[in-house]
Every structure is written in C-alpha cells, then in structure tokens.
Image (spheres, rainbow, N blue to C red):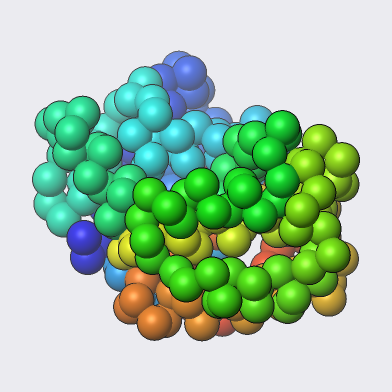
Amino acid sequence: MNKITLRNTMPRVFACRDDIVSDTWRQDITLERGHVYLIEAASGTGKSSLCSYLIGYRNDYDGEILFDDRDIRSLKRFEWTRLRQRSLSYVFQELRLFPELTAWENVEIKNRLTSHKPAAEIESWFERLGIADRRDTKLAHMSFGQQQRVAFMRALCQPYDFILADEPVSHLDRVNSAIMAELLLSEARQQGAGIIVTSIGHHMDLPYEKTFRL
C-alpha cells in the first residue's frame, strides 16, 4: 500500500455540526508511504475515531477513506486481515496487552505469528528502552509507561507499509520518548514505511513533514 486518502471524511456523530475547523475532517488529504505525519487533536475531536477508521474497526463516517484509490468500505474481512498482517501496524492508545503474560511473552506472541524479527534484536530493544530487567515480569506488575514500550515493540514485529501510533509516549519521559522515536524512525525507514503519530499533547520528536489538526 502506497497511500491513504481521506475525501471529505467526517464522523457521523459530528454531522450536524457546522463549527468544525479542521485540517483533516471534511478535507481531501493524502498520506504517502515513506513520509512522517503528526495528527494533533484536542480531546473530543475524533482522534480515536480516526484511528479506528484507518485500522478498519469502525465505519461510522461520511465521505471516503481510500487505500491506494480503493474505498476501504469495499474490503472483505480476509482483506482486512491481510492488511493488518502485512501493511498496517498499530500501537493502540489503550495498549491491548495480555496482563497475565510477561513483557517478553507479549512481544513474542506477535513475533511467533510473523517470524519477522530474530530474538536477539528484540532483546536489544528491551535494552535500549530500559526495561531489560523487566522482560520476565508480568504486565500486570508493570507501570503504564513500561507497558507502552512493550506495546511499541510488539507493533514492530511485523512488516508494514504504514505504522499508526496513537499517543505512544503519553506516559514516557523525554529520554525514553526520544529513544522510542529513534527506533521507530529506523525501523520504518528499513521498510520504506510511512509513520502516522497522533497526540493530544506531548508527542514523539520525529522529523514530521506535515502536521494535521483535527
């Protein structure tokens, strides 16, 4: 997949509002593979809705969203599955990890499905992100910031054309946020992938080529 296009897209819950001022809603925008984008939003402006649309979890919007000129409403379930396996990776704001599993197991469960990364490389990520000593700790006993780093590593364990990170550093200090940004940029560039980061405040320090405001 080389591009994502929004054409006059708007969440239906906002349909009756005429006071929307946005770079994204009711606009025609294109996000291209290989580029880095930031989507800034205030609370309640539809950030979570947009993420759900792009990953195919919801379709309660007007207008169009296109993947390579194809309206995503026409995609079949098996096509969405293939896209999430090969073209779209997603760092969930709410993480969606398994609290009963260890940090290592949460990452490895994804990597076993994809066989995308060698164990030694994942070990190096744990070291770089400062949680190597927590790799065998169950998620339920880790802080939210530590869990964010686990969810981030899990998202890297697959091929992708675009990676969508929904507030990925909301609970991280600037040092760890910078390390995560460096790792994300390196991994995305290896695949020629696009990066889409959302934020309602503190965000990753990346070389954003375009910032959109909801």
Which residue occupies the foreground of this view, 207 or 121? Answer: 121
Q: Residue 48 at what x, y percent from top left?
A: 55, 35
- The residue at the point 12 percent across, 45 percent down is 70
Asked whether the viewer can see residue 180, the reply is: yes
- The residue at the point 48 percent across, 18 percent down is 13
Q: Is residue 9 above or below residue 70?
A: above
Q: Residue 114 at what x, y percent from top left?
A: 36, 55
In the image, taking residue 141 as reference, residue 154 lies left or right, namely left
- The residue at the point 84 percent across, 65 percent down is 133
- The residue at the point 15 percent across, 30 percent down is 76
Q: Is residue 101 above or below residue 34?
A: above
Q: Residue 200 at what x, y percent from top left?
A: 70, 49
In the image, taking residue 75 as reference, residue 134 lies left or right, namely right
In the image, taking residue 155 as reference, residue 98 lies left or right, namely right
Q: Quadrant of residue 202?
A: bottom right
Which residue occupies the foreground of this view, 67 or 158? Answer: 158
